[in-house]
Every structure is written in structure tokens, then in C-alpha cells.
Image (spheres, coloured by chain):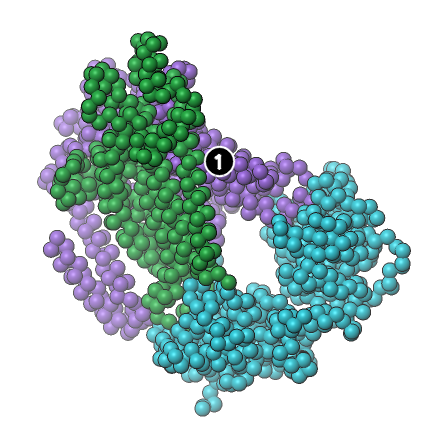
Chain colours: A green, B cyan, C purple
Amino acid sequence: MGNVLTIILKRLALGLLTLLIVSVVIFVAVNLLPGDFAEAILGQGATPEAVASIRRDLGLDQPLVTRYFDWLGGALQGDLGSSFAQANFASFTGTTSGATTVAEQIAPRFGNTMFLAMVTAAIAVPFSIVLGILAALYRNTVFDRATNIFTLSSISSPEFFLAYILILFLAVLNPIFPSLSNIFDGMPFSERLEKSMLPALTLTLVVTAHMMRMTRAAIINLLASPYIEMARLKGLSPMRVIVRHALPNALAPIINVIALNLAYLITGVVVVEVVFVYPGIGQLFVDSVKIRDIPVVQACCLIFATAFILLNLTADIMSILSNPRLRHPK
Amino acid sequence: MSDQPLVKMRGVKLEGRSDEVWSPIINGVDLTLARGEVLGLIGESGAGKSTLGLAAMGYTRDGVRISEGTVEFDGIDLLKASAATKRELLGKRIAYVAQSAAASFNPAHKLMDQHVEGPVQHHVMSRAESEADGIELYRKLRLPNPEQIGFRYPHQVSGGQLQRCMTAMAMSCRPDLIIFDEPTTALDVTTQIEVLASIRDIVEQFNTAAIYITHDLAVVAQMADRIKVLLKGDEVETADTRTMLSAPTQEYTKSLWAVRSFERPKKPAVQTGAVPVVSVQSVDAAYGTVPVLHDVSFDMHEGRTVAVVGESGSGKSTTARCITGLLPPKAGQIMVDGQVMPADYRKRSKDQLRQVQMIYQMADTALNPRMSIGQIIARPVQFYLGLTGAAKRKKVDKLLEQIELEPTQYYNRLPSELSGGQKQRIGIARALAAEPKFIICDEVTSALDQLVAEGILRLLARLQDELALSYMFITHDLATVKAIADEVVVMKDGRVVEQGLKDEMFTPPHHPYTDLLLSSVPEMDPDWLNNLLAERGVDNIGDAAVNKM
Amino acid sequence: MIWFVAALIGMGAVAWGFRFAGQAVTGNAPKFRDMPYGVAYGYVLGAVVLLWLVWAYMQGRSADPAIANKFFFLRIAIEGFILFAIAAWLFRILGRTFGTAWSRKMFRSMPLTASFGILTILIYAIFAVFAGVIAPYGQEQIVPGVAANIIPGGDPAMGGNPAFPLGTDQIGRDILSRLIYGAQNTVGIAFATTVLAFLLGGTLGFLAATLGGWLDQVLSRMVDVLMAIPSLIFALLLMTIASVWAPKLGIPLTIFMVVIIAVIDSTRVYRLARAVGQNIVVMDYIEAAKLRGEGLGYLVFKEILPNATAPLLAEFGLRFCFVFLTIASLSFLGVGIQPPLADWGTMVRDLAGFVNFAQFAPLAATAPLLAAGAIALLTVAVNFVVDWMLHKSSGLKE
């Protein structure tokens, strides 16, 4: 067991290191901007004195390395800095009330995005794994070919195409679900679920297609292995061959597929949230990109990257844990 | 018991699908097997023997189908039987032992859990009974530590032991028939013999009928009562083992038997004081921090062949990598013609590189599939000899003639259009094109069928006589050594165990390891295994004997 | 909901009956005897879906506009599907009859999906190259005296105009022309980006595979880090920065976008090229060439590259789809290809509101869907071709 533990610890350390380097990359990328926040906040008619004073206030006169560690230290404590847009607003009005920090802006939206992701996963994961196994078992049949065409098409289509198709059929032509997902705090769960349904279904379509194809490939690969042939030649029932011989070995690839696709959700969520005006982190991100609200962009980017890295890390660790060679060393 | 045969296959035709087209694998073969009889099924690769063996169980792999014929097992028509009826037979009355035990055991379950699955699912025994029986079978198969070995995972057990565990698993329901599909092909000779002995014992003990599939004539001679020879999906002949060995009727069978008779005339000993073409001097080598070679020294002289023999992991190929400079030694040096060679091939001059050439085991990966034969051979001609245009073409044509391929016919072909033996010849031509003094032949015949391998050996021998070449011949096959070597170097665990002239090496007394290696190579004599066991005892063969050293 | 469950149970009964009848009629043939219940159910389910589609299609042709409108899109989809299938089938016959022996052989073993893909890619290529000739109007042209928001269909009674078969957008530009120019802009830019990504990633990947050592280590770790950031997110971040730089340097933002996406995608190309390269580098013929004393150039261009073309070509197709979708997404989000260039992603965003009119004027809703569909159709086509290529090169694995 010690063996596995060291491998997992190593993998964790590597993940943390990657995260750290990614944070450096994001920070440096943002600091490649000409000028700085101070000039940007004050706009065209900034006097040098005003710029210098704001720089001092925001700590922009410190060297890059110091600023990085300040930012990172803050981020670790949940302080992601001040929103540029809000600061701008505040500088005009002279007030400091309202959601001025990035963290305050992101927190509620983060919850909304997580909700959307969980609804999607709850539909997509069981559905796609069952479909994937069926396609693998009945490969090269009409069913398999039809699902192949269907999944390939839905992978190939941009998310907004799928989104508008769903809006067309499920909101406009047959008003089953609302096409706008204006959810807010304190909304009852059922209503929230109903309003999130179309974005969740759109994401489900994309993710299911990916997950199903990967599950199918993993299972086919597995069914071709000699020990499955051996199990069949022992006269075991097809059910037992699958449950007892295929599944324990399929677990690792399937967990991997799930984690990878949840990671994929992160990218998909941006476009889908915009289409449905879903108040999640993706929409905030795009809005901030458009108005160049750098601190928010930076923070969202860090959150997305963290989620992405953590999910990939989970996939790795799960597949290490489910490998009998590692669990039972010689 | 009735007199009807256990297995009766009549006019069985099998087809395989490739590129959406069904093409024949087996063109109508009859097979009859009596109770308790062992039938050897032999043929070269692609003869369809495994497919036929599986068809005897009423089973076909994906992409294979039985297009015609009947398969009866104990009077039950397997091709018409329902899936449930077949499941009832498989495992219980017909069992299978696969080529690779490591791949055929489920890595997620312990050996014993897989062993008892058959008996329990087929309601032959309870789990406890089957476990006790399993331990008994392990003991009968002379597995070390029979009480505990079943409670390990497959990857925790060595290849030869796994193969015996699989035989035990096949025996778990006491079937009437076991199909052995090349069970010892992946094993080293010293391990193989032990598996062979235990399989034969247990099959005899329970009077189980068996179909033993192999490409190795000497192995089948030990195991089978009767032999059926297949060639490209057709039956060549079937006869009693002894009759088949002593008096084969078909030309093809005779030619298979004749292969073993090729042997080169003996050469006089090397004059003392002659400068060796290549001299390996006290070489130590390691992959990273793992030491592989320890103080390896031997010389190779002009016009002679040194065979380097040993089992997998003995360091034969690593020695070759040190000589070519791919793996610079940690200590010691390589000398060519009395000159010290730079350790790293990147530091060697063009002329130094030219002197040492190599021929590879897998001709498929040794030739660039996107280059024509002409391009492949012409490259070293141009690179080393500086020939271009017509002179280059002339040289390539001459090389093709030397390897007995018609230049105009082969110059523009791609490697994929050639047979395995032809590809290996191109590899030889490419080495010759550099006009070297010394060629390393790394298992050059082990991927080839016996007849083809024989042709390659004869060609290499002829070229050596014509061009005064020196060969370093890496092999694990002692028959090849007998055929072509002048001197032999025996390696084990990265050390040279023994070296000397071939005749000395093949006559006692030997170093104990050489002795074990030599005695473990199966011979065509059907009594060979019996004699060996009588001589050495069951505990003095295979891993047990290696471990005693 | 109750009806739905009842239908499922009903189908279950039919499936049982179907299998039983099959066994009885065929005298217990193996096909029916060994048929699991799930498979029988699958057959019935498939049949019901087919029947429903036929019914929906008939509804779409109904005389009552309320009903016809409701099933209009389904009808179009079914008709389109059948039309494309026929076109692909004809194209395959064409390919089997004409051309060299090699191309005829290729078409013989080709599935319909792949021939559909090739046909579609060809059509797109023609539109992209000859957009200026084919399009009736310029991409930025606002025809004088023509109203904005003309409904597609060209039927004046419904608010259309025969001169503008697909209508006009909010400021009166011809949608058909912009769609055709979109092929040039969107596809052209995506293609250029992919080529750039391949030059960058491919070169570095093969170098890393051939040379190994520290170069491989450094490059691979860098790629690991870049790949740890989701690509669309990273692209959006860099685009934000670029949007500040672009006006300062006087370089169009689109150029920045091409470079940014090329760099991000080159990491994926690098991974593949390195893996493919490593598989080839371990081959004995590479060892033979190294031992012969060949230089790096000969190794890469003569020995490695010719053997890597098949996987690289497939990857090029996949990468193109990815780049194309990323650019479309960026444009859709408003930070990609900049106006006034006609571009499908931007068109979808601008015209998206029309989808809400689908119930009353289905034709109005087609405009945004056409642009989005144009994107989807091309990526689907490329994916079908790549799928076939991968299937072919993987041989008989399945």
C-alpha cells in the first residue's frame, strides 16, 4: 500500500506545482498589458500624481515578484482583489459600498455554475455510460452506427448551435422549458431546476457524446483482451463475463472518462451560459473580457484552471487506485 | 463409454474477414479425436491451427466464421447447439489453455478466485471443495508453495508458473477435452521443459483428451500420440507420432524434418596471435543505474561466426548495443582491428561506423515502410561509398543478386510487398552495402518459419565464405547455433558463463548452466522428455534447477 | 408523463410478442432463439421512433399552417437528411466510376458518411475560394433602398424579397452573400490557424521525439503547463490582453487571434507529433540510420515524416474542427473575428433573436440557424472523414 501512497503523493505534488506555475502564467500574461490598472482606472485625463497615488494604494509600485506573491496570498485566502469595473464605478461615485471585490462578485455565480454542472453530470453520466456499454456490446449493428453518427454530429456542432436547436424545439415550438435562465438566490429548487434545464440539456448533449464514445472505445478495448475470451471459454454467462470480468477492469477507464468530461464541461459552460443568460461564472468571465475587467478575468481564469487541474488529477489518482498491479505489489 | 469419438469435425471451413471481405483460413479439414487421446496440431504461422483449435470448441473469434462443415463433441452438434447448451459444455467438459497466461488471467482477481469460478458456476463442486481441489492440482503440477500460490494476483506470479496455474484451472472441472494453444511458446527453454513435463503428467493422469497446438516439432513429439500437419489452411498429413517422425509421406513434412540437418563444416581453430576483428574487453554496462553487463569479454575473428547464447534478460542484445555504440559501456572497451573505438556511436567516424553493421530480428521494423527496396539499399551505398547515378544502381543490382533476389523485379517494390524471408534478405543487403567486416545478427531467424530461416542461414554462410565476413550471432535457439556457429559464448545474468569452440561446447563436460540450457532444448525423439526426466528427476529441471545454481 | 410510461410498458409487451412470433415463424432459428429481451425491445423502440418521424413529417406537410409551422423544422431536417444521403450516395458512385485506380479503390470501401464528408468539404472549398464570384452582393454592402430585416424565403406575401432569398440583416446586408463570404473568412482563417499550429507544434514535437534529452523535457513540461489551462478560457484571457495591444500596435485583432489560437492548439499538435515520432523513433530502421551516421535533417524528413503522414492528416482534420469551433465560439462571444468581415459565429449572435419567431414565421428563424448550421455541417463533415480514416488505419481492431 505504501507504494501506491507514494505514487499518489507524487502525483498530488505535481498537480500543485502545475497549479502554481499556471497561476504564474496567468499573472504574467495579465501584466503584459501596456500601462497598468491605475492608468486604466483613471482613463485618459489622468494626472501623473493621481496615477502615482492609486499605484501606491493598489501596491502597483512594488516589483512584479512581490505583487505576484501578494496576489497569490490573497487568492489563497479568498481575496481576489478589487473588481476593475466596480472600482471604476466607485471612483466616480466616491462610495465603496456594493460588490467591489472580485470575490463578492464571483461567489454567488460560482454556486450557480456548480449547480448547472451538477445537473448536467447527473443526467449525462449514467445516460452516456449505459449507452456507451450498449454500443460496445452491440458494435457494428444499426444501433451502434446510428449512435456513432449522432454522437459525432453533436460533438462537431458548436454549443450555440445545439443550444438554439433546443430553444427552437423545447422553448419556442413546444413551450416546455423557459429559454432564459434568469435564476436568482432564494428561488425554489424545482423552479431553479426547470430554468436550468435547457442549458443543462445542451451541455448534456455535448458531454454525453464525448463520454459515450470514450466509454465505448474503452469497453471494446477491454472486450478484446484475452482474459475476456478466457471467461467466455469457461462457459460463463454473458452477464457474469461483463459484471465479474469486464467491469472491475473497466472502472479505471470509465472514471477517467467521467473526470475528463467534467473538465470539458468547464469550457462548454462559457458559451452555454451566454446563450441562456445564465448568471454563472462563465457569463461573468465573458462580460469581464469584453469590458477588460482584468482582475475578474484573472480570477475567473484561475478558478477555471484550478477546476480543470483538480479534475484531471482526480482522474489520474482514480486510475492509479484501481490498478491491481499497484494495489497488490509483488 | 461408447466407441464414438469425442470430437468429430467434418469438412470444416473457416473464413476470416478483412476489409469487409471474407477470405478462407481453413479449407475443409477433418479431425477425429478419441477419448484420452492427445492430438498435436502443427503448422507454421498463418496455417490456421489456432483458429481450428478454437473451432473444435464451437467457438470463433470476432471476424471469423465457420462457413461449412460440422463439429460434434460427444455426439452434440456444436454448430447447431444453442448458446446455453454450449455454455454448459465450455469450461465443464471442454477447457482451453491460452498462449499467454499473463494476458489470459484477469488482473483484477486472485488466481484461486478464477480457478473456482468454473466448478462453482457449473455446479460441479462447492467453492470449498474446489479450493481444496485446486491446491491438490497445484501440487500435482509441481508448483512451488501450492497452498498459497492461488491466493496471489496474476502479476505476482512468474510466466511459467502462471501457465501451470492455467492448466490447473482448465482441469478444475475434470473436462473430457483440453485445447492447449501454444502454451509454452512465450517461455524460455529452461522454463518450458518444466511446464511440458507437468502438463503431460496431468493429462495422462486424468486420461484427458487434448489438442496440442504448436509450431515446434520437437515439443509436439513429446506431447502428442498423433500429429496432424497443417499448411495454409489445408491438412498435409496425419499419422502416429512415431510414424510421422520416422516415415513422413508428404514432401512438405519431410522438408520440415530436414531443416534440423543443416550444419556447416568445421573450421580450423584461430591461429594464436591473430588480431581479432572485434574484441569486447571487460565491458560493464548499465541502463541508468541498473547494471546489466558485468565484465564481458570475448573476441571475434575474421571469417568466423561467434554465437552468443542465453535466455531473455541474459544481456546478449545489450552486448550488441555496446559494440555498436548505442549504449556506451560504463567500463571496458570495444576494439575493432586492434583500434579502440569511441564508446558513443556519435563520436565514431563514418569509416568506423561502416565497419560494424547490424541485421535485426524483426524485418518489419527494420525497413522503412515508405522507402522502396532500391532506396533502402542505395542509401548506404551512396552514404559510405560515395557512389551516385549508374554506378550506384549497378552496385545495388549486384547486392540484390548476392541475396538471390532479381534486381529488375524488386528494385521498385515496397517492403510491404515482400514476404518475411525476403524482407530479412533486404536487411542483409543493406548491411552488405556498407562493405563491412563485421555484422551483428540479432535473432535474425527467430521470427521466421523454419524453412525460410534455413534459407537465411544458408545465405549468411555463403556470404561469409565469399566475403570473409565475421558474424556475431545472437540467438536463444541452440539448433541455429549448431547449424552456423564456429564459436559459442554462453551468457547468463549479464555475465559470460562459458565460451569456446562449438564442438567443445556441445560435448561434455560443460559448465552446469550450459548443461542445463543444452539439455532443456527439446529434441525430435519422442522419448527425449522421458529419458531426460528419468535421468535428472522432476526436481532437477527448469526454474528449480536454475535456482539451485 | 403517464402516457409516456404507458407507451414504454406497451412497447415492452410488443417486444415480447415480437420475439415470440419470430421464434414461432422461423422455427426457432438461432437469431430469435438467442435474442436477449433487450435487443427485441431495441428493435421495437427503433420502429416506433421511425414511425413517429414519418408521422411528424406528414404533419409538417399539413395544410393547416399552425400545425405545419410546428413541424416545419423537423420536416426540413428530414428532407435535408434524405437529400444529403442521396447526394453522398451519388457522389460515391461517381467516385467509384471515375478517377485513378487508387481513388476508385478508396471509394469502394468508403462508408456513406465519409463520402458525404468529402462532398461537403469540396463544396465548402469551392464556396470559400470563389466567394467573390458566387455571392450576389458584397459582404459589407448595404444595398441602397433595401429594407433591413427582410424575411428569408423570397415570398413578398410573407415579408420576403426575391432578390434576397435569405433576407437581409438588421442593417440591410444580404444574408446569403454574408453566408458565402463567411465560408471564405471563417474557414480561411481557421485553416490558416491550423496550418500555423501544425508548423509550430509539429516541428517541435518531432524535434523533441528525435533528439530527446533536455530539449524534450523542457518542451514537454511547458506544454503540460499550457495544457493545464482550458483552451477556450486561455484564449479568452489572451484575447482580452490582445484587444488592448491591437490598437496600440496597429495590428488587426484577427491576426492576434490567429496567433493565440495557433499557439494554444500547437500544444495538442506537439503532444501528438511527439507521440507519433516516438513510436517511429524506436523502430529498428531509425536505429540503423542513426548507426549509419545520418544527420538530423535526413532522419526527420526522410525517415520519420513519411511514416507519420497518416496520423498527422487525421489530426489535422480534428485540429481544424477544434480551431474552427474555437474561432466560431470566440466570434459568437464577440471577441473573435471582427466586423465588418462576415463571419458565421458573429452572424449567429446578431441574428439569434429571430429564433423566438419560429412559431409564427418559421422562415425568420432559419437565418441564425443557417449560420450555425453552416459551422456544424462543415465540422460534422470533417469529423466523418477523419473517423473513417482513423478506422481504416486502425485496421481490423474491431
Q: Position of residue B159 (x, y in %)?
A: 55, 67
**Relative to B23, A283 lies left or right:** left
Reply above or below: B390 against A49. below
Towards the viewer: B59 or B524:
B524
Q: Quadrant of the C terminus of chain C?
A: bottom left
**Image position, residue A305 (x, y; %):** 36, 37
Q: Quadrant of residue B71?
A: bottom left
Q: Residue at x 16, y 41 (%)?
A: A192
Residue C62 in view (yes/no): no
Q: What is the number of callouts on the image?
A: 1
Q: Residue at x 44, y 68 (%)?
A: B110
- Left or right side of B240 for B82: left
Vertical arrangement, residue C395 with respect to residue A64, above or below:
below
Q: Amino acid at mark 1?
A: Met
Percent x, y of residue C390 = 45, 47
| Near-viewer residue (A196 or A324) | A324
**In this view of the protein, which residue sits in the foreground, B315 or A80?**
A80
Residue under the image location 31 percent in, 54 percent down: A129
Res. C145 in view: yes
Q: Which residue is mark 1?
A: C222
Measuring 75% from the left and 70% from the top, which residue is drawn there?
A: B511
Instruction: Determine the secondary structure under disc 1.
Output: helix
